[in-house]
Amino acid sequence: MSTTHTGADDGGRRIPRPGGRRAGGRAPTPGRAPRPGQRGGSAREDGRHETRSALLARCRKEGRRAARRGVFDAWVLAGDGLPPWLAMLAAERDRVRHRLLRDAAVERAAAERAAAEARGDAEAAEAAMRRCGEAREERSDHLDVTRAQLDRLAEQAARRRQLRDAVARWVERRPGGAAPAAGEEPFPEPTARPAANPAADVARWEGPSTTGISRRGTLALLGSLMLVELPIYWSSFRRVHGTGDASANLLTATFTLAVGIVMISVPHVLGRMLRTLPATGSPRLLALPALLLLGAWTHACWVLGGLRASLLAEDRDLLLDPDQARYLDPEVRDAGSVLDQLGIGEQTMSLLFTALLLLSGGVAFLLGLGRTHPYLAAYRATSRERERLAAAEQASTLAARRAGQRAAAHPAEVQAGRDALDAALREVDDRYEAAAHAYLDGLASGSRDPAVTEAAMRLSGQWPLLPRPATA
């Protein structure tokens, strides 16, 4: 028997009706076919949301309804072509298959994009891993160079220590050197000494130490030293700029703060500059200007100390009415200067303030000069950088491995998607084939005409009953 194929996108295609209305057959009216894009009747429009049992029950019910209404006769069922309801089932099946194929194509495209992104991530992570590895190797070479420099410093220190020991022994062996104590017998010098191990006598760097003041501690000490000097500058500059006026107070405060910062920061910066002179490539010509600035700072301390002492040495005049002044105690009326009341000379007070300024600035200078040796600082910084690069290299390695695993899993995911799609398409074909047979079974069981029943049973014996899908 020849069959008429129905397209996947044309559920209402014209179905030939062999026999037409002959033999008293009624025009087939299986029901209105769903229009494209129609939202009503989700079970009929989208067979994915309808279970197999519900579809079979629906088709069997429609077959019995068609039998009761006498839609078909034996001539129609025995003619060419399919009954309209079976043609509608074939069209609905093709629509479901089309949606499955479309969704699978979308998922396959998304999987391709994800695989491409994974390959790109893997390549980027591998490039970052190579860069980090090269940088880490470079830092390792720098550490070897810095360690060699530190070993040379250790050898120089060992040679200076040997020189001091040799000089001390030479002084002891002089005729006027120290004689042995009473009752003490000197031990004779050994005639021969055992051969020393050259490898054991070579001086080496003992490794990084944790001594020193942190950066925060240094800043805290510098701030404390500045607070010590600010009152001295404030009291001295108030007499210079005057008091009682807002502009004078602002000028005094600004000048006090500026001088305090300069008098503390200058020796500290000079100390740091002198400390960096042993570093490779450091401008050694800065040593002379640094020493000159240090001398200028010392002179400024002397001048500021003398200024403060001279202000304290001034006589304090009481601005009183002459008639009232004669009633005061002579000691109060002729109080004199602050230094006279304290019994301290002006030169002593000047030396005291100068020493205080030199002490605070000298501590700042020592803080700058006592920084870590440039070689040791370079070793610590390079070691930390190498550790950071090693961690970054490890992270890049893990990222490249994960991205490579995602990219490598793409073929298996594609094959699994294809297998799942084939299984879903076979399930749709089997479901709608069973639905077509259920329709004919309902038609055969509900018909009262033996000829119709026999024709329906004969038509149900065909396999496949529905035409093969166009997208198969």
Image (spheres, rainbow, N blue to C red):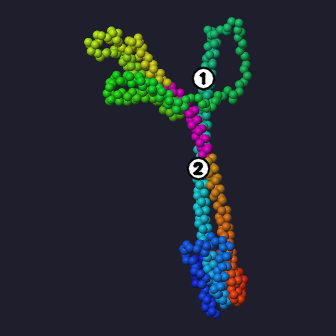
The numbered dot on residue 160 is: 1
| Quadrant holding the N terminus | bottom right
SS category of the residue bearing label 2: helix
Looking at numbered disc 2 in the image, what kind of residue is underneath it?
Answer: Ala
Q: Find residue 439 and report its image quarter.
A: bottom right
The residue lying toward the viewer, choosing from 428 and 304, is 428
Note whether residue 98 is visible.
no
Q: Position of residue 39 (x, y in %)?
A: 55, 72
Label 1: few (<14), some (14–19) or many (≥20) C-alpha neighbours in 10 Å: few
Vertical relation: 48 (above or below) 260: below
Which of pointers 1 and 2 lies earlier in the amino acid sequence? 2
Vertical relation: 60 (above or below) 200: below
Vertical relation: 211 (above or below) 325: below
Q: Find residue 236 and report its image quarter.
A: top left
The residue lying toward the viewer, choosing from 189 and 401, is 401
Q: Position of residue 34 (x, y in %)?
A: 57, 77
Q: Position of residue 313 (x, y in %)?
A: 36, 15
The numbered dot on residue 218 is: none
Pointer 2 residue = 128
Residue at the image point whose x is 61% and y is 41% from the top: 387
Residue at the image point whose x is 64% and y is 57% from the top: 406
Q: Which residues are magenta?
A: 364-393
Question: Magenta stretch: dominant SS?
Answer: helix
The residue lying toward the viewer, choosing from 169 and 144, is 144
The residue at the far top in this view is: 182
Looking at numbered disc 1 in the image, what kind of residue is underneath it?
Answer: Arg
In this picture, residue 227 sits left or right of residue 100? left
